[in-house]
Amino acid sequence: MGGHFVQGHVDTTAKILSVTPDGNALTFRLQPRDKSILRYVVEKGYITLDGASLTVTKVVDGEDGYWEVMLIAYTQEKIVTAKKKPGEEVNVEVDIVGKGLAETLASWRR
């Protein structure tokens, strides 16, 4: 098996804060509606936006927390998120493996 585990459900939505060109790539900065999911988002991990699994390039925690993903030219041609603009929203599915691990660790602490 290769790639990321994607279940096809929506954990929350996120607002696109900015889209910044970087050569032929685009860096998207996104802020989740439900800030509690930030604990499942890790740099170099993955997140699913509008059904497409992407690698997280940066994470900032806290009330104003956000994460970033970079879309290379090939990806921009293949996914709907690439056409979206700042202020628009995307559907978000967090990493089920990370979510399961976090829940397991939390149950050990109880």
Image (cartoon, grey):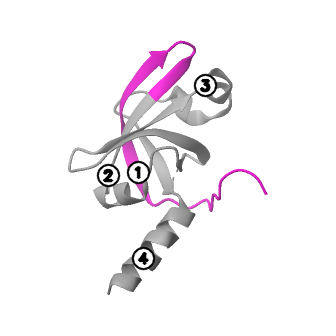
Give the alpha-carbon distance from disc 1 to disc 4, as whole Å. Answer: 25 Å
Tell me whether circle 2 and circle 3 mark residues in contact (CB < 8 Å). no
- Label 2, residues with CA under 10 Å away: few <14, some 14-19, many ≥20: few
Badge 2 amino acid: Arg
Foreground: disc 1 or disc 4: 4
Mark seen at residue 33? 2
Please indicate whether residue 28 sits to the left or right of residue 109 in the image: right
Badge 1 amino acid: Thr
Q: Pointer 3: what residue? A: 72
- Label 3, residues with CA under 10 Å away: few <14, some 14-19, many ≥20: some
Q: How many labels does the image show?
A: 4
Give the alpha-carbon distance from disc 4 to disc 3, as whole Å. Answer: 35 Å
Q: Where is residue 80 in the image (x, y as percent from the top left)?
A: 59, 35
Q: Relative to the observer, which residue lies in front, 8 or 95?
A: 95
Give the alpha-carbon distance from disc 3 to disc 1, as whole Å. Answer: 22 Å
When asked about the image quadrant of residue 77, the answer is top right
- Indicate which disc, 2 or 4, sits on the residue closer to the N terminus: 2
Furthest-right residue in view? 1
Q: Relative to the observer, which residue lies in front, 102 or 21?
A: 102
Q: Where is residue 72 in the image (x, y as percent from the top left)?
A: 60, 25
Mark seen at residue 13? 1
Furthest-bottom residue in view? 110
Q: Position of residue 93 (x, y in %)?
A: 51, 56
Q: Quadrant of the C terminus?
A: bottom left
38 over 58 or under it: above or below: below
Foreground: disc 2 or disc 3: 3
Name the residue located 42 percent from the left edge and 27 percent from the top edge: 85
Q: Give the range drawn in magenta.
A: 1-27
